[in-house]
Amino acid sequence: MTEAMIRLRMSNADAHYAGNLVDGARMLELFGDVATELLIRSDGDEGLFVAYDEVEFTAPVHAGDFIEARGRIISRGNTSRKMEFTAHKVITSLEKAEYDSAAKVLEEPVLVCRASGTCVVPGERQRRGG
C-alpha cells in the first residue's frame, strides 16, 4: 500500500479569519501535495486530481499550528487511484500565553480534516515507481 505524509506549520499568511483561523481550503491544498507524492511514488507521474468524494472538517486550525497530512492509495483502476486523507494538528500555538511564540506538542494529535478522492494518471504516463 502506497502512503505519504507531510508536516507543515500554518503561518500568519494562511490565516484568513478572526482569531487567526486558517481557511479549510489550506487542508485541501496539503492533501493535493500528498496526492502528488503518492502518484509519483506509485506511477512516476504527478497525475491529476479529478474529484473529492467527501470532505469533513472536524476541528479548527490556527496560525502557528503544525499539521501532519497523510494519504494513502486505497484502490487502483487502470488509470484512476482512489485515495484517503487525514490531517492532524500535532503542535498548537498557545494564543493566551505570556509570549506569542509559545506552543505546545499535543499528547494526542487532533483530527482536523478527513477526505477521500480520486486522481488519474493517463496510461501512457504511467511508470512504476518514481
Image (cartoon, rainbow, N blue to C red):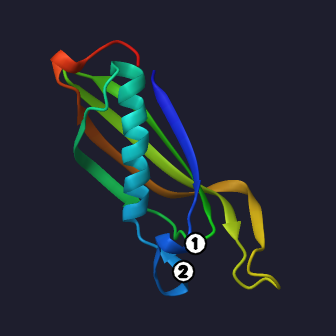
**SS assignment at label 2:** helix
Residue 78 visible, this orientation: no
Where is residue 35? Give x, y as percent.
Answer: 37, 38
Q: Nearer the viewer, residue 110 or 62?
A: 62
Residue 86 shown left or right of residue 10 in the figure: left
Residue 52 visible, this orientation: yes
Where is residue 28? Give x, y as percent.
Answer: 37, 55
Q: Nearer the viewer, residue 46 or 107?
A: 46
Seen as rendered, the residue at the extreme top is 128
In the rendered image, which residue does mark 1 sit on?
Answer: 63
Relative to 113, residue 18 above or below: below
Residue in view at x 75 percent, y 75 percent = 101
Where is residue 82? Give x, y as percent.
Answer: 29, 32
Q: Based on the displayed image, in which of its 4 quarters is residue 127 positioned?
A: top left
Q: State if disc 2 and disc 1 touch (CB < 8 Å).
A: yes
Q: Based on the displayed image, in which of its 4 quarters is residue 66 positioned?
A: bottom right
**SS assignment at label 1:** loop
The residue under label 1 is which amino acid type? Answer: Ala
Where is the C terminus found, in terms of image quarters? Answer: top left
In the rendered image, which residue does mark 2 sit on?
Answer: 20
Residue in view at x 40 percent, y 66 percent = 24
Residue 50 shown left or right of residue 113 in the figure: left
Separation of disc 1 and disc 2 at Cα?
6 Å
